[in-house]
Amino acid sequence: MKGSTVNLSRHWIALGLLVVVLVVAGSVMAAPRMDIENDSFNFGYVPQNSKITHSFWLKSTGDDTLRVVRVVPG
């Protein structure tokens, strides 16, 4: 009976390790990722009430769908 208790606890440890490995592997596999080459731009001197614009290029580099759901200018 003592030997079966040791085998049972080894099975629980192995099962626990398997669960941890599967959770970590699942979180590492597919993820969206975005790269911005130049994430800031200095307009220099701008007269008051001027309208100015600048475009930023966003590149999806992850291995899952990237969704931009909100942009907050600052």
Image (cartoon, grey):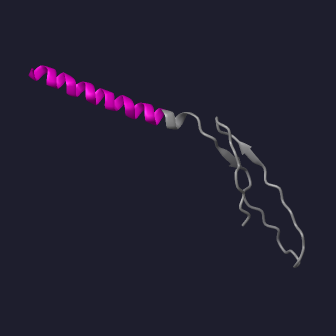
User: Is 22 part of what is drawn in magenta?
Assistant: yes
34 left or right of 47? left
Foreground residue among 60 and 22: 22
44 left or right of 40? right
Displayed quadrant of residue 72 = bottom right
Quadrant of image for the C terminus: bottom right
Q: How many marks?
A: 0
- The overriding secondary structure of the stretch rendered in magenta is helix
Up the image or down, 29 lies above or below 66; here it is above
Quadrant of image for the N terminus: top left
Report the residue at 32% width, 32% height from top: 16
In the current view of this chain or complex, which residue is farthest to the bottom?
48
Displayed quadrant of residue 4 = top left
**Residue 66 x %, y %:** 68, 42
Report the residue at 26% width, 24% height from top: 11
**Residue 17 x %, y %:** 34, 31
**Residue 35 x %, y %:** 69, 47
**Residue 31 x %, y %:** 60, 39
Q: Which span of residues is magenta-colored?
A: 1-25
Report the residue at 32% width, 28% height from top: 15
11 left or right of 38? left
Displayed quadrant of residue 20 = top left
